[in-house]
Amino acid sequence: MQLKDPQLLRQQAYIDGQWLDADSGQTIAVNNPATGEIIGHVPKMGRAETRRAIEAAEKALPAWSALTAKERANKLRRWFELLMENQDDLGRLMTLEQGKPLAEAKGEIAYAASFIEWFAEEAKRVYGDVIPGHQPDKRLIVIKQPIGVTAAITPWNFPAAMITRKAGPALAAGCTMVIKPASQTPFSALALVELAERAGIPKGVLSVVTGSAGEVGGELTSNPIVRKLSFTGSTEIGRQLMAECAQDIKKVSLELGGNAPFIVFDDADLDAAVEGALISKYRNNGQTCVCANRIYVQDGVYDAFAEKLIAAVGKLKIGNGLEDGTTTGPLIDEKAVAKVQEHIEDAVGKGAKLALGGKPHALGGTFFEPTILLDVPKTAAVAKEETFGPLAPLFRFKDEAEVIAMANDTEFGLASYFYARDLGRVFRVAEALEYGMVGINTGLISNEVAPFGGVKASGLGREGSKYGIEDYLEIKYMCLGGI
Ligand code: ADP
C-alpha cells in the first residue's frame, strides 16, 4: 500500500494499550470506494470487548486526571507533532478507505491535528470561579473537573477529524475515552491511536473498538461507567443513542444532520459566491454535514449565478483520489448514490430542470456526475432533506423575508451561508437564520478555534474553540462556611 511507515496500517483494535482481535475471530472487510478493492480487515468486536475497553478507561482515569494540565498538554502536543510528521501516510490511508482526493485527505489530517494542538493549549485554561458570598461567613468556589469515562461514535466522512475533535478536549480535560469509528473508515482511527501510543498516552486512556455498531454502540450507551457520549452522524441514529443514554442520564454531545441553505442576494459578489458554493457544495463530494444543500438565488442575479456555477462545476475532475488533479472522488457506497438519484428524480418530477450531470459517472462504481438543478420547487424533497452528495439544487426567491422563511423551514439548524454586501442586510439575515453557524461571504467555516455545532435537530453541544472543552467538564460548587 506504499506507506512510508507500514506500521500505520493496523488491522487490530486497540484496547487497554494492546492490539487485539475479536473474541469470535470475526473480521470486517474494508474496501476502497474508488476501486472496490479490499484494503484490509478489522476485528468485528461486540459487547464483551467494548466492556473491557470501558473498564480499562475507568482504571486509567485516576492517574490520567491527576496529571497536571501541563503534563497532559505535553503528551497531546507530542501527538499533534506525530500526526503532522505522518501527514502523508495518514492522508494516503484516508484516501484509500474514504475516497476523498489526496490533497483533501492531507488537509483533513492538518485540520484533525489542529484540534489536538488547540486542546493541548486549552488544557491549561480550565479556570474556575470565586463567587462573592451571599452571607458574611461564606465563601463560594467553583471548580471544573473531568466528567470521567467518555465514549465517542464517529462517522466515515471525516475519519480523522471527527475523532480528534472529541478525543482532544476529552483527554485535555482529564477524561478517558473509548472510540467506535465507522466501519467504512476504521484504519484512520487505528493509525491515530498508534500515534497516540507513540506520543506516550498511557494505556487505557484512549481505546478504539471496531465492530458491530449495534453491539459496540449498545454497550457504550448502556454501561453505567460511561458518563458521556459524543456522537457525530445521522439525526436518526443520534436520536436513538440519546434515548439509550437517557436510561442513566449520561451527558450527550450530538453533531447530527444538516440541511444548509446557501443564499445569494442581488448585491453579492457573484464570482466570490460561485467560489464559495463550489467549496461548500462539492467538498468531499458533498458528503459533509455543513455542505450547502439548498442554494437560494435572488431573481436579479439568478441567471448570471447559474451560468457561472455551471461553468465552474463543469471543470471538476472526477476520479480516484490518488490520481493527480482529481478534485472529486467517489461516493462512499451504493446507498449514497441511491439517495442522490432519489433527490434528482423527485425534483425533476416536480418540475426542476437538469442543467448539469444527473446520473452515475462513466467511471462506474459509486462515482457520480456533479449535478445542478435549476428552478427547483419548494415542494422538492431536497428542500427538506440532506442529500449528502454532489447535487446543487437552485431555488429562486424575491426578497429577504421570503428566503429567510424558506431557509428556516427545516428541522435542521447546523450551518448556513449567505452572500451579500449591504451591512444592514448582513446583520438582519445572520441574526434571523436559525442555525448554529453562519458563513457570510465565505463557504468554509470550520476550524479549531471556532465553535462548531447546531441547533434544533442538528444537535447538542459545541466542538472546537474555548467552548469545546466545556462539554467534557463538570462544574463543582464548594460552599465554605464558618469563616
Ligand atoms: P451515516 O449515515 O453518516 O453513516 P450513521 O449515523 O448511520 O451515519 O453512522 C454514524 C456512526 O454511528 C457510525 O460509526 C455508525 O457505525 C454508528 N452507528 C450506526 N448505527 C448505530 C447504532 N444503532 N448504535 C450505535 N452506533 C451506530
Image (cartoon, rainbow, N blue to C red):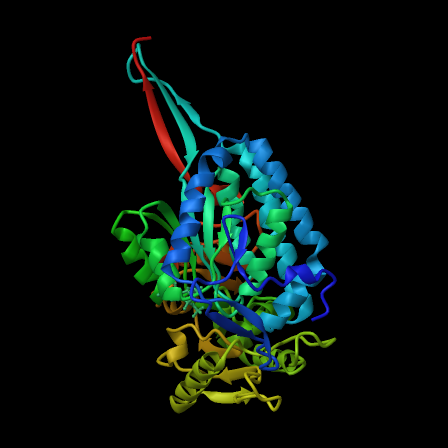
Which residue is nearer to you in this view: 168 or 463?
168
Q: How many labels does the image show?
A: 0
Residue at the (63%, 37%) spot, across then down:
74
Residue at the (67%, 80%) spot, across then down:
317
Q: In which quarter of the image is the N terminus?
A: bottom right
Q: Looking at the picture, does residue 34 appear above or below residue 58?
A: below
Does residue 72 show up? yes
Percent x, y for residue 167? 51, 49
Q: Looking at the picture, does residue 455 appear above or below residue 336?
A: above
Percent x, y for residue 9? 63, 63
- Looking at the image, residue 244 sits to the left or right of residue 23; the answer is left
Q: In which quarter of the image is the C terminus?
A: top left
Residue at the (72%, 60%) spot, across then down:
5
Question: To which quarter of the image does residue 158 belong?
Answer: bottom right
Q: Quadrant of ligand 1?
A: bottom left
Percent x, y for residue 221? 33, 54
Q: Looking at the picture, does residue 152 appear above or below residue 93?
A: above
Does residue 443 show up? no
Question: To which quarter of the image does residue 143 belong?
Answer: top left
Percent x, y for residue 412? 38, 64
Which residue is nearer to you in this view: 271 or 343?
343
- Looking at the image, residue 114 sits to the left or right of residue 377; the answer is right
Q: Looking at the picture, does residue 41 appear above or below residue 440?
A: below
Question: To which quarter of the image does residue 403 belong?
Answer: bottom left
Q: Which residue lies furthest to the left in this view?
A: 247
